[in-house]
Image (cartoon, rainbow, N blue to C red):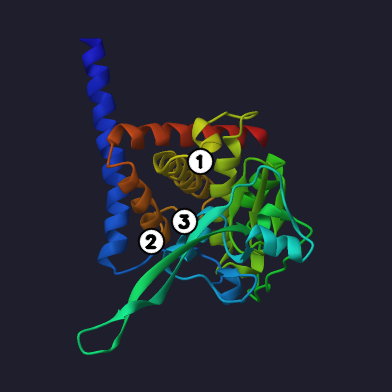
Amino acid sequence: MAKAKRQQFDDTAKDRLTALIRDGMQTALDNGERWHAGYIASNSGLAYSLNTGKPYLNNNQLYMLLFYGGGPCATYPAWKKIGAQVREGEKATTLVHVGTAKKRELDENGNEQFYTKFSYFNTFHYSQVDGYEYQPEQGSNDFVPIEAAQKIIDASGANISHGSSGASFSDKNDSIAVPFQSDFESAELYYGTMFHELIHWTGAEHRLNRPNVATYFDDVKNRAREELTAELGAAYLSAYVGIETTPAPNHAQYLNAWIEALENDNNEIFAAANDAQAAVNYILELGE
């Protein structure tokens, strides 16, 4: 009987959590709002070819921004040519070039015929190489620190660098990289981003050892679970220090993508929430 009641409670909690997240997302959708990163979007914030200086397009851009962020990318020989070296163990990202080629045969009217030609190439983001310095343009927003939020970040002792074209946590280097504080549209968005990356940071093997951190790039479901964990944890920490106490539209849109990747599995969503709570507890205890 007790076991049945506990199961009923768990099922109800899962349903409520899912509904809460979805309500926030639906509000954003109803308002016609779209997700954005929260920091200044300029050409320097896009992933682009080191050789041509042109930004990648379509899925190529999406892949690089998802996995590494913006900035220059190049093939192994191209990096080597300028004296940079891809670090041992780094994996290339395979991108596709879509072009046209002429068919040998003419059409029935004697005109040339063309077909779409796909070619693939392996590229490395600048963050994967040594011997190359990249400094994106710094924003001009006035930044006013939020004391309670900054205190949490400082107490973590995390290795944090500013000036990247995107926000990320590197499990391999055990470090967090974010854009300049002045690149963010507001201090609230900066700290929300920092909290998101700090939640990822807690999952390292020598901290909470969350499996989805080590296997982040191996499977989309692993990424979805970890990203959902990070967003829920960031929302909790933001509320804890008194910023963004309701789901922000950009957070809602971001969460939606990962919930879809989890195939709307309430068990996975509930587990991600548990992981988020454990991560939040870990971070807050560091400041006690």
Disc 2 crowd, CA 10 A, few/some/many (<14, 14-19, 20+): many
Q: Where's the C terminus, which quadrant?
A: top right
Disc 3 crowd, CA 10 A, few/some/many (<14, 14-19, 20+): some
Answer yes or no: is residue 58 visible.
Answer: yes
Residue 255 in picture, x, y percent from top left: 38, 51
Q: Which residue is mark 2?
A: 249
| Gap in angstroms between the C-alphas marked 1 and 3 | 27 Å
| Gap in angstroms between the C-alphas marked 2 and 3 | 11 Å
Residue at (34, 46) in percent of width and height: 261
Q: Which residue is mark 3?
A: 244
Instruction: For mark 2, give the secondary structure.
Output: helix
Q: Classify 272 as above or below 230.
A: above
Q: Are marks 1 and 2 in contact (CB under 8 Å)?
A: no
Dot 1 or dot 2: first in sequence order is 1
Q: Which residue is mark 1?
A: 216
Q: Determine which of the numbered discs, if any, sits on residue 195 in the image.
A: none
Q: Are marks 2 and 3 in contact (CB under 8 Å)?
A: no
Give the quarter of the image for residue 199.
top right
Instruction: For mark 1, give the secondary structure.
Output: loop
Dot 1 or dot 3: first in sequence order is 1
Residue 154 lies left or right of residue 122; in this view the side is right
Report the amino acid beneath label 2.
Answer: Pro
